[in-house]
Each structure stands twice: as C-alpha cells, then as structure tokens.
Amino acid sequence: MTNEEPLPKKVRLSEADFKVLPRDELILRWKQYEAYVQALEGKYTDLNSNDVTGLRESEEKLKQQQQESARRENILVMRLATKEQEMQECTNQIQYLKQVQQPSVAQLRSTMVDPAINLFFLKMKGELEQTKDKLEQAQNELSAWKFTQDFPDSPTTRMLWWDSQVLVSTPRLRRFEAKATFLYCPACNA
C-alpha cells in the first residue's frame, strides 16, 4: 500500500447488527473491516520498514562519522607525537649549545695563566674603571651646571624664585628700566 491511497473507512459492527443484518450484508461489512485492518497493517509495516531503513542509514552515517573521527584523532595524535619529538630535539640541542659555549674551568685557568693575556685583562680592567670614573664625574658636573625647574620643591629653587619675584616687583627696577630706555633711545636724545 502506498502513502497516496486513501485509507478505507472504519467499519463498526455491534451485536445488534449481527442479529438484524442479513448474512450478505454482514459478509460485505466483514470484508470492508478486513480491508481496513489490512490497510492499517500495511501502513504499520511501511512505517516500521521506513523507521528501520532510517535507523540503518543513521547507524551507517554514525559509523562513518566515528571512523572519520577516529582517523582524524589518529592523525592528530601522530602530529602531536612528532611535535613533541621535535621539541625534545630542540631542547637537547639548546642544552648542548649552552654547554659548548660555556668555557670549562681548565680553559679559563689556562687563559689566566698565560702572562700576556693576564696583563691584557688587567689593562682592560684598569681602563674600564677609569672610564667609569670619568663618566660619573661628567654626570656630576652636568647635573651641577644644569639649572631647571626639575626640582621645584627644593629650598634653593624656592628661594631663587622668591628673590626674582621681589626684584621684578620693586619700583627701583622700574626706574632703572625707564632710564635705560631713555639713554638708549635714539629718538629721545635728539
């Protein structure tokens, strides 16, 4: 039975129908009832077969997805193992290079035992100390000559600022400015 065929009508038979209806009518209704039951059974079988088919397809898809996931997992595990091995090799190489670069105690002693090299190192050490002293002296001189308002809270800075404000505000300074203007003004002397 296909899904497009209409389902036969449900036939109801009561006990009164069995007593009243003629035999031919009962047989006809019984056949209709049988057709209805067969249609329902066919529909049930179709639904079950569709469900089973759908379940089998879903199961097959899930198996394929599981296989694909397992394959990807294996690939990722292999890549991880490769990266870990590369990392271990790099770590070993770094340790080896560190060991190679560090001179041994015997090499250092043999270098210091050589009088020419020892003298050279002592000269370099002396020159380095002299250079450090000169640098410190130059920095001290620079900071002594440098007068800015970098330190406005220092007492010297406050005192100098106050003195300059007092000088600017006195009338005596204004008289000197007026005299200087009069003396050096060519138009005023004519």
Image (cartoon, grey):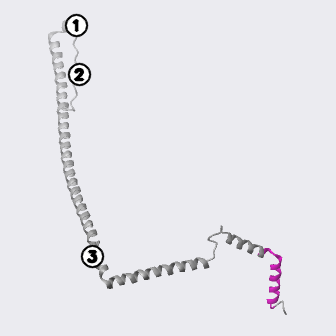
**Amino acid tagged 3:** Gln
Provide the residue designation for mark 3.
107
Determine whether the residue tagged by mark 3 lies in a helix, strand or loop. Answer: helix
Query: In front here: 172 or 78?
Result: 172
Horizontal and vertical percent for residue 155?
A: 68, 69
Provide the residue designation for mark 1.
16
Q: Quadrant of the N terminus?
A: top left
Q: Main secondary structure of the magenta part?
A: helix
Q: Badge 3, how many Cα within 10 Å: few under 14, some, many 20+?
A: few
Q: Which mark is residue 69?
A: none
Distance of label 2 from label 1 (alpha carbons): 20 Å
Q: Quadrant of the C terminus?
A: bottom right
The picture quadrant where one finds residue 121 is bottom left
Mark 2 or mark 3, earlier in chain: 2
Horizontal and vertical percent for residue 153?
A: 65, 67
Distance of label 2 from label 3 (alpha carbons): 109 Å
User: Up-down: is 12 above or below 128?
Assistant: above
Q: Residue at x 25, y 61 (%)?
A: 87
**Number of the front mark, 1 or 3:** 3
Q: Which mark is residue 9?
A: 2
* Region rendered in magenta: 168-186
**Amino acid tagged 1:** Ala
